[in-house]
Amino acid sequence: MTDIERINELAEKYFTAENKKEIEEELKKLLLPNSAGLAQINPKAGDIEYNSKKIVEYINFAQNIGLDLVVFPELIMSGFPLENSIENHPIIANECVKWLNEIAKITTKITAFVGFVEPCEDKFYDSVAVLNGGKITDIIRRKSLPNNSEFNDFNCITPFESLNNMITVNGIKYGILIGEDYRNTEQNADVIVNICAATTKIKNEQIKHSFMSSLAQKYSVPFVYVNQAGATDRASFDGTSRVFDKDGKLFACAKSFEEQFLIVNPVKNLGKIYPSVMLSNNDNQSQFSLDYEPDMERTYKTLIQGIKDYFGKTGFRRAVLGLSGGLDSTVCAVLLTDALGNENVFGVSMPSKITSQTSKDDAQVLAQNLGIGFTVAPIKDMFDTTNNCLQNLFADVEKHWDNRYKQSFTADNIQARSRAMFLWGVSNEFGSCLPIATSDKSEAYMGYATINGDMSGGFAPIADITKTKLFALARWLNKNREQKNAIPQSVIEKRPGAELAIDPKTNKPLIAEDALMPYEFLDEVIWRIENKKENYNIMINSEFLYEKSHSVTREQKTIWLDKFYRRMATALYKKSIMPPFVIVDSPSYNSKQLITSCGINYKCVEEKEIEQKIQQWL
Amino acid sequence: MTDIERINELAEKYFTAENKKEIEEELKKLLLPNSAGLAQINPKAGDIEYNSKKIVEYINFAQNIGLDLVVFPELIMSGFPLENSIENHPIIANECVKWLNEIAKITTKITAFVGFVEPCEDKFYDSVAVLNGGKITDIIRRKSLPNNSEFNDFNCITPFESLNNMITVNGIKYGILIGEDYRNTEQNADVIVNICAATTKIKNEQIKHSFMSSLAQKYSVPFVYVNQAGATDRASFDGTSRVFDKDGKLFACAKSFEEQFLIVNPVKNLGKIYPSVMLSNNDNQSQFSLDYEPDMERTYKTLIQGIKDYFGKTGFRRAVLGLSGGLDSTVCAVLLTDALGNENVFGVSMPSKITSQTSKDDAQVLAQNLGIGFTVAPIKDMFDTTNNCLQNLFADVEKHWDNRYKQSFTADNIQARSRAMFLWGVSNEFGSCLPIATSDKSEAYMGYATINGDMSGGFAPIADITKTKLFALARWLNKNREQKNAIPQSVIEKRPGAELAIDPKTNKPLIAEDALMPYEFLDEVIWRIENKKENYNIMINSEFLYEKSHSVTREQKTIWLDKFYRRMATALYKKSIMPPFVIVDSPSYNSKQLITSCGINYKCVEEKEIEQKIQQWL
């Protein structure tokens, strides 16, 4: 074991260790001059005291062992993102400064770079404070902001063209870059320090990695990247702080999706490369694929961090969910178990007369396998009472209104809403418990979920996972979790359906793909929109993966695409009230569309047709 | 009647008239050279064909009567805002160009300025096309974008430093300003044309008005402002297009909250000033006041436009709502009646055993007064069945989990959710019908509403109106609607309460103010946060209006403020899933706060206390 490996082994042990003094002594001996600590913190948005405590503990440790420098991520004091909070509550920024001034007092023998939101008259800056010698000695402000920012924070923050961003510590000139301020890269630095809060976006990871490496090469200086860990509502930060040498070669990399204090020596190229989810995957696809394997570990860790942090940061610890025996609720139950512990998860099987025996059995077997709480609560009484009451009400409404549907979804929805009544009841009756919405991304796009029913809940773990990816995840979980095959094989094998209605054609419960379209096709449409910004016309003329193994007529494809866009447009309302979830795949964090934009025509119109229409309007 | 008055009278009649040719002939004779039409359109976001039809009709009319110029608002072809739609569906921008090219063909004898989103490689510009002589002759791009934009659109749009924004039409040089691009004001223009899409924000209206007037004076040229009308989800545009002469004096002003084709002659100072809500009000308060009267008409029109456009643009026409006999549902029913017509509104009284006879009577009288559909649907059976089922379920959960509440809100919530079951049922069973969420802003801030209960629905008409303003609105409606006193006096006089629980202290239904705090105090806290960005410490040391008429101890005030901030933080989830509503008062359109930011400490912490905490952490 090299010294730097031993150093990081000790640093990992330190915070939970009892022999702190002993560890400090050993570290002091091992550390060379110009060593730095990269404090990859998981902050709580807006909770300055919580974040300050972490900052103080890391500075204190760093100082005790004689590090030159400790670097914290961008905006770490306030946490990031905050959305509009800074604007509405400028006290957050003012308090940052007060806390920083006090924290600075402890930096007697060390320098700390701390990201914070800086108030200045009626503006806010994305700044880094340099703490040293018991006070704030410098402040560096971010010079440019992204044009298409995914966070509202940047709407409140003003860029600032400062002249200098170079800080000298023990003879080494550190050029500070905040966020993606790359155009301002300091050319005369001995070390570039890139202070970030960057979300996990698999499609960009490799581009980002090579870009940082190329910057190190270009300026021929070591490049240090420090990133935030943890999830804040939808936004997920992967940490994975790292250091490149002046030739662009990686020599240090922190863990992904975890807090860590990584000790490196950027001047002497000393560091440890931890096995990293972000470095190992290679999911930079140029076309849609069902081979989700290379991205599964990142997906799983993003989901687990997302659940843990949403519950932890809002002060909840328990989840109650309906177990239908279907894929969605099954995968949710496994993820919740891994994130919260099986003692904190309760599954309720809520069968109706449509629910098959297999579904009931699968729900029970799953709960047993996971060791979570479980009971059966049939919805027959709820359905009957609600249906009775509604029939009376409908008779009254019908006296006043026409256009009563011959075939409505009312009965389907009563079932889904009765189940939600049960789950919200448990949440109201038992402390610290959130009900879970089990909608997946494919169905969210299609609006294939019931408002106040299965799409309602305090958190929606898989709302950004498409159905085909969910199947892959289920298989991966059965193979890769410590407990193998927790998910009954039949859950993975059966074709998904909500079991809310009987298909008159088959006299069996309706299969979702029959009501919608094949999931493989549906998920490729979503993938093409989100990743390629493709439109209807491009898609109709491209070959889909599904078409390689199935014969699909152009007529059939037209029907599916028409249905996709029609359903997507009318599902905009449902998407707007989807419970919180963590972004796993969507390229855009805040990808919202106005509900009244449902009139968008996603198909190109021919010039000739336009000309004719205009002539008619004259 | 002057010529210009007659001209506008004819223009108003034109589009629904049968004798179009006759009107055109008269107008041709009356119009002087350099006359222009300001086409204050209400677009549909993303519906390019719908918007193009309006554009074509206005251009055609303008050309037929011999106008020099017709001016359309900013981004009118795509509609504005679109949020992230342009980014995900660039086809919208591409189609704009195609449609514009075809529309240009009809501009043989006229010039048109048309706002559109312009695609250019991987960028988008906020542009104005100049159509003339059968083609697009010029494109002007917006040079700067707001730093703290309220719309995500501006995240996708790139500013562009074009050299020229001057267009000459019949010898007159028009300097084009897009949006709030004032710093680029063209100094050599004969007329400044400001092409906008500006939301109704009462606090800024007077500042904006004087600023435009001062620009006209400064450059000593007429200043023409063209704005969009209509509501798009939360965003409400008031139209009120206007023209100032070179001395800054207003000489033309279109109606507010309506589509209009206003004909003016900016060179000869000819125009008509229509009575305008935006010009007459003077609600530019520097402190909180209960005198809402000056802003009531604007409030009412914003709400009506918001309801009309949300329903109209999403293709719904009917609303069903619960009538509790309380203030919230009563005001909602009146607004819905005025916006949709009484034949399209259905009220359901859903009493429980707690519901008082007065409440039941008030609901019925209101429905009779308004002439809306009405029936009574008691929730006793729903409550009993749900409660029975839940007690069994809870007994099972209790075997697994501790921390069952002794006094939970479960029973209260069952009532609210049973009612929502009824309303969503009607929405599922009858065509074109949305259920209504009746939550008001004061209660939304406090989370004083039930998820999947009264806060669920397809639209929330009064979600941006505080309770004290709602009382004022109820009085105003009784006085100013054609049908006087539709709202029973007792609704306005009784103290609000949800009638979900009995107050053990009084043995009567719980009064909301007893559970929360006086609404007058609560609403001032909200007002101070939204308008003054004040924090806890400033508020505790300021005198509230409520304190002028009531003796409030500092201890009591502390209890209320603590409760406010505590409840506001835990209500962040509820606010995130609030149904769509139109912004009336909030200064920020997209004022969202992350749910996991509930740990924000809104109180200042003393330096000494910080120092002590830090010492403990070392």
Image: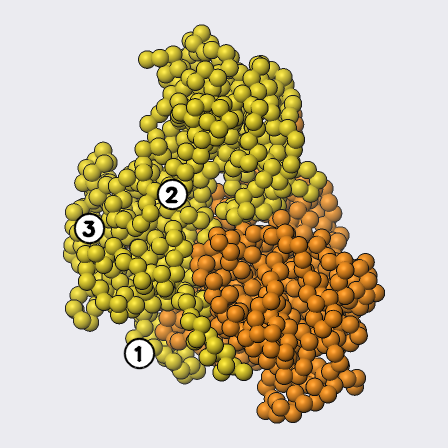
Chain colours: A orange, B yellow
**Residue B533: x percent and y percent?**
41, 55
Disc 3 chain ID: B
In space, the residues marked 2 and 3 are separated at their CA atoms by 30 Å
Q: Is residue B523 visible?
A: yes
Mark 3 and mark 1: Cα distance apart in space: 34 Å
Q: Nearer the viewer, residue B600 or A342?
A: B600
Q: Nearer the viewer, mark 2 or mark 3?
A: 2
Residues marked 2 and 1, same chain:
yes
Tag 3, which secondary structure?
A: helix
Q: In the rendered image, which residue does mark 2 sit on?
A: B203
Please state the horizontal and vertical placement of residue A393, each as a whole percent of the image: 30, 52
Q: Chain of mark 2?
A: B
Nearest the camera: B427 or A63?
A63
- Determine the CA span between mark 2 and mark 1: 47 Å
Q: How many marks?
A: 3
Badge 1 amino acid: Lys
Quarter occupied by residue A520: bottom right
